[in-house]
């Protein structure tokens, strides 16, 4: 019988002197969707002030200030702010931003994170991409893919007033161009009733003057360049006028993304 990551973190932080659960493990303990593999297979990530090898753990040598350490669910763990900071600093950008987005939705102070990152350009840029409007990690991935592709930063959770006092909220988009992009995850868009509801809702959005591009789960991150190209073309058709330097940057990033894919 497998022991949960929480129970293993509780065990190791209790037995290993000076150890603190950190990074994705800490985010998981705080209740976030943070793991990229099955929980049973995830090692306990520990921050320790000295080099060590602990079986079943991934040890990161770090001396943590007392203010960055707390106890949650009987586990010695980095605080939400420190966990968000560490994930932004050490994880791939889209994963780090996805975790920071979730922490912001739970009340972590974005300005405080930005102040911590002063002087660290790459980290500052990662934290600057965060947005508490993202409703899921995959929505965050989609937003980061578009921004890193050279497109203008989209707004999240766009309210659209529909006839008969109805409301719709778009995952992200550009209100000035009436263009929305939505992530279609398996969990909410697979049954016939789900598809009918989506079609009815998007027909109402079209009637209200909006163009909506749905992005399926299997498209990101595997076909990120295709998504960026599709959205860029739609933005231009809707009235966006990128400068020549922006066009050059977008084309360069599309070529680089396709080279990495192949």
Image (cartoon, rainbow, N blue to C red):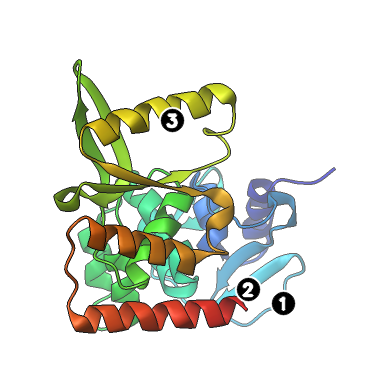
Considering every residue shown, the one lying at the far front of the view is 237
Residue 224 percent coordinates (x, y): 49, 65
Q: Mark on residue 22?
A: none
Asked if marks 1 and 2 touch (Cβ < 8 Å), the reply is: yes
Tell which circle, 1 or 3, labels the residue nearer the N-terminal end.
1
Total number of numbered discs in the rendering:
3
What is the spatial separation of the Cα atoms under label 2 and label 3, in whole angstroms?
45 Å
Q: Is residue 32 left or right of residue 182?
A: right
Residue 44 percent coordinates (x, y): 65, 61
The residue lying toward the viewer, choosing from 167 and 78, is 167
Asked if marks 1 and 3 touch (Cβ < 8 Å), the reply is: no
Name the image quarter holding the N terminus.
top right
Asked if marks 2 and 3 touch (Cβ < 8 Å), the reply is: no
The residue lying toward the viewer, choosing from 253 and 44, is 253
The residue lying toward the viewer, choosing from 8 and 116, is 116
Tell which circle, 1 or 2, labels the residue nearer the N-terminal end.
1
Q: Is residue 113 left or right of residue 54?
A: left
Q: Which residue is mark 2?
A: 59
Dot 2, crowdedness within 10 Å: few (<14), some or many (≥20)?
many
Q: In what element is the residue under mark 2? A: strand
Q: In what element is the residue under mark 1? A: loop
The relative height of residue 15 versus residue 161 in the rendered view (above or below) is below
Q: Is residue 35 left or right of residue 148?
A: right
Q: Mark on residue 198?
A: 3
Name the residue rendered at 32%, 64% in the picture: 232
Location of residue 208 (image quadrant)? top left
Kindly tell me whether residue 259 is visible in this rendering.
yes
Q: Which residue is mark 1?
A: 53
Residue 14 percent coordinates (x, y): 64, 56
What is the spatial separation of the Cα atoms under label 1 and label 3, in whole angstroms?
51 Å
């Amino acid at each position: 019988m497998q022991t949960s990551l929480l129970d293993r973190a509780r065990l190791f932080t209790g037995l290993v002197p000076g150890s603190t659960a950190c990074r994705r493990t800490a985010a998981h303990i705080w209740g976030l969707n943070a793991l990229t593999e099955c929980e049973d297979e995830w090692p306990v990530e520990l921050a320790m002030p000295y080099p060590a090898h602990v079986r079943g753990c991934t040890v990161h040598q770090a001396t943590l200030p007392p203010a960055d350490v707390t106890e949650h669910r009987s586990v010695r763990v980095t605080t939400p702010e420190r966990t968000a900071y560490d994930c932004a600093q050490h994880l791939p950008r889209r994963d780090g931003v996805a975790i920071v987005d979730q922490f912001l939705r739970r009340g972590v102070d974005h300005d405080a994170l930005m102040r911590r990152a002063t002087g660290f350009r790459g980290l500052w840029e990662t934290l600057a991409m965060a947005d508490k409007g993202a409703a899921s990690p995959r929505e965050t991935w989609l937003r980061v893919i578009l921004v890193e592709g050279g497109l203008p930063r989209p707004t999240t959770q766009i309210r659209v007033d529909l006839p008969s006092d109805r409301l719709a909220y778009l995952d992200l988009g550009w209100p000035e161009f009436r263009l929305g992009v939505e992530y279609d995850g398996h969990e909410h868009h697979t049954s016939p009733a789900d598809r009918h509801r989506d079609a009815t809702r998007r027909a109402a959005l079209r009637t209200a003057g909006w163009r909506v591009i749905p992005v399926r789960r299997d498209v990101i991150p595997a076909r990120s360049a295709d998504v960026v190209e599709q959205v860029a073309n739609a933005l231009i058709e809707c009235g966006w006028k990128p400068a020549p330097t922006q066009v050059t940057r977008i084309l360069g990033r599309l070529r680089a993304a396709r080279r990495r894919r192949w």
